[in-house]
Image (tube, rainbow, N blue to C red):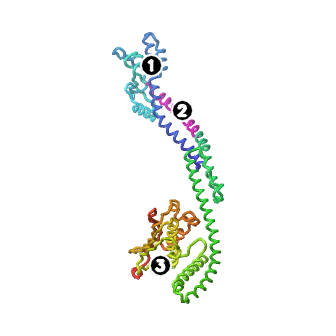
């Protein structure tokens, strides 16, 4: 029980209530001592007035008056004259004098604590003002033991009452915590456990019901998290299914493309100039498609193969991309520009880099065609001591807000109607495999620009120069 939240709350409540009562107890005991002494002064004053009214009171009655007032002597000052009104033998010398007329709260607390710590019975003198102006001063001598006993009894009673109040308060708070706090928390825990058994089941997503604002915020945050997780798991399942389908399609497509590759080999021996110019492009395209199918089958459905790095001439890769896209332009008014140094060599997987640049250029072409306006697509490259930088820019209409928000999220970042949104996701994954980054630099009505950054890390100076 003590390890539970409600059990610890119960214990802390008891401790704090007792501490609060102790802090209140010390001033209370000091006040009790002051009231006790004032009561003895008032009793002594009444006894003195009785004696002054009749001087013939017998010694036995005088002793009874002192015993009733619980004092040894009573001195009363009236009309500037100090008079010992009642007296009896004092068993020992007076140890200390207390003047209640000038006592402040700190002094009263200090004197009370001193008396509680001193267990020896002493005789003290107490000075005060008579009630109802029945004189100028009243002074008594009295023992400390009865006062100390009364103070201890009072303190013990206060402590017992405080303990009872603290236990009752703690019990009520314990029950309140169990009902209003622990029960909703246990409900949240049970929902979490139930959801963990089948996170794909949307019926197990928690519905916020807590009346406590903080707990309701927790439930709403948990509902959002569970909803997103359920959607992600469903998307993962769809991706797995898609991967299986792609593997099957790739297997059959590879066979078809292999047959097509055999026919294209014969085109290379044709003497037609147009055929001689286009045949190598066709052969390269079919070869890339065959390699892609083989990679899909060899490395699984969910992951891209690791890049096979080699030194390649970037201008050749970009030239192949531009030539392929020019054939796909058709009647659209789209121009292409290349700003690639002829001597620029970089270290990358040629097929994967071709796929990335081709995907970016194809997206730009489709965006410009969709807008119905003329446009330009440019590919530029440069390098520094740390990396190779490739820029793909266009003058198209820019990406819509949803596409920018889910740019690299599968099935959500597509712009073209009917598109899957996988192109940029795959491209970013391929570039990450090279240790680089693919990012969107800008987009808007004036156009869009993507940047590919391929680091040179891991290459020595001779390789960079090569």
Residue 168 drawn in magenta = yes
The residue range painted magenta reads 142-170
Going from the N terminus, do you reach mark 2 or mark 1 first?
1
Q: What is the secondary structure assignment of the residue under circle 2?
A: helix
Report helix, strand or loop for mark 3. helix
Q: Nearer the viewer, residue 120 or 295?
A: 295
Q: CA distance from mark 3 to mark 1?
A: 120 Å
What SS does tag 1 mark? helix
Q: Main secondary structure of the magenta part?
A: helix
Residue 452 shows in this picture: no
Splitting the image into 4 quarters, where does residue 339 fall? bottom left
**Residue 418, visible in the rendered structure:** yes
**Image quadrant where residue 84 sits:** top left
The C terminus lies in quadrant:
bottom left
Mark earlier in primary sequence (2, 3): 2
Q: Which mark is residue 157?
A: 2
Q: Which residue is mark 3?
A: 319
Q: Nearer the viewer, mark 2 or mark 3?
A: 3
On the image, the x and y values in percent for residue 366 come to 52, 69
Task: Locate residue 239 relative to residue 81 in the image: left or right.
Answer: right
Q: Residues within 10 Å of mark 1 (few under 14, many from 20)?
A: many
Name the mark on residue 379.
none
Instruction: Give the answer, above or below, for where 55 lies relative to 153.
Output: above
Q: Quadrant of residue 78?
A: top left
In the rendered structure, the answer to whether residue 448 lies left or right of residue 296 reads left
**Label disc, if present, on residue 44 of the rendered structure:** 1
Label 3 packing within 10 angstroms: few (<14), some (14-19), many (20+): some
How far apart marks 2 and 3 lie (CA) works out to 98 Å
């Amino acid at each position: 029980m003590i390890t539970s939240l409600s059990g610890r709350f119960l214990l802390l409540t008891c401790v704090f209530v007792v501490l609060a009562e102790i802090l209140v107890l010390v001033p209370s005991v000091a006040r009790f001592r002051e009231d006790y002494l004032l009561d003895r002064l008032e009793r002594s004053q009444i006894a003195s007035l009785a004696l002054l009214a009749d001087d013939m009171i017998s010694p036995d009655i005088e002793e009874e008056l002192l015993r009733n007032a619980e004092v040894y002597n009573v001195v009363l000052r009236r009309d500037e004259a100090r008079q010992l009104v009642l007296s009896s033998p004092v068993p020992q010398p007076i140890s200390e004098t207390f003047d209640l007329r000038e006592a402040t709260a700190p002094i009263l607390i200090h004197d009370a604590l001193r008396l509680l710590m001193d267990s020896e019975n002493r005789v003290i003198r107490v000075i005060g003002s008579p009630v109802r102006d029945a004189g100028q001063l009243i002074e008594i001598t009295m023992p400390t033991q009865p006062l100390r006993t009364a103070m201890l009894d009072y303190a013990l009673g206060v402590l017992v009452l405080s303990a009872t109040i603290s236990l009752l308060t703690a019990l009520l708070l314990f029950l309140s915590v169990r009902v209003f706090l622990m029960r909703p928390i246990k409900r949240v825990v049970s929902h979490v456990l139930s959801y963990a058994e089948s996170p794909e089941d949307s019926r197990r997503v928690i519905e916020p019901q807590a009346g406590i604002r903080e707990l309701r915020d927790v439930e709403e945050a948990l509902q959002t998290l569970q909803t997103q997780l359920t959607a992600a798991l469903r998307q993962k399942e769809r991706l797995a299914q898609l991967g299986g389908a792609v593997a099957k399609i790739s297997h059959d497509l590879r066979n078809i493309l292999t047959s097509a590759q055999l026919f294209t080999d014969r085109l290379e021996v044709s003497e037609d100039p147009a055929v001689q110019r286009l045949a190598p492009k066709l052969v390269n395209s079919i070869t890339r498609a065959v390699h892609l199918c083989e990679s899909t089958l060899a490395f699984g459905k969910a992951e891209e193969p690791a890049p096979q790095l080699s030194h390649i001439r970037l201008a050749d890769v970009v030239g192949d991309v531009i030539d392929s896209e020019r054939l796909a332009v058709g009647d659209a008014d789209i121009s292409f520009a290349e700003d690639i140094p002829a001597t620029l060599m970089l270290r990358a997987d040629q097929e994967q880099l071709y796929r990335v640049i081709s995907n970016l250029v194809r997206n730009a072409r489709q965006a410009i065609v969709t807008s119905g306006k003329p446009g330009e697509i440019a590919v530029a490259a440069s390098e520094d001591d740390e990396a190779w930088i490739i820029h793909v820019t266009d003058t198209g209409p820019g990406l819509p807000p949803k596409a920018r928000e889910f740019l690299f999220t599968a099935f959500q970042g597509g712009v073209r109607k009917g598109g899957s949104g996988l192109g940029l996701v795959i491209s970013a994954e391929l570039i990450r495999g090279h240790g680089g980054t693919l990012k969107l630099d800008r987009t808007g009505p004036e156009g869009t620009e993507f940047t590919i950054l391929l680091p040179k890390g891991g290459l020595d100076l001779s390789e960079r120069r090569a």
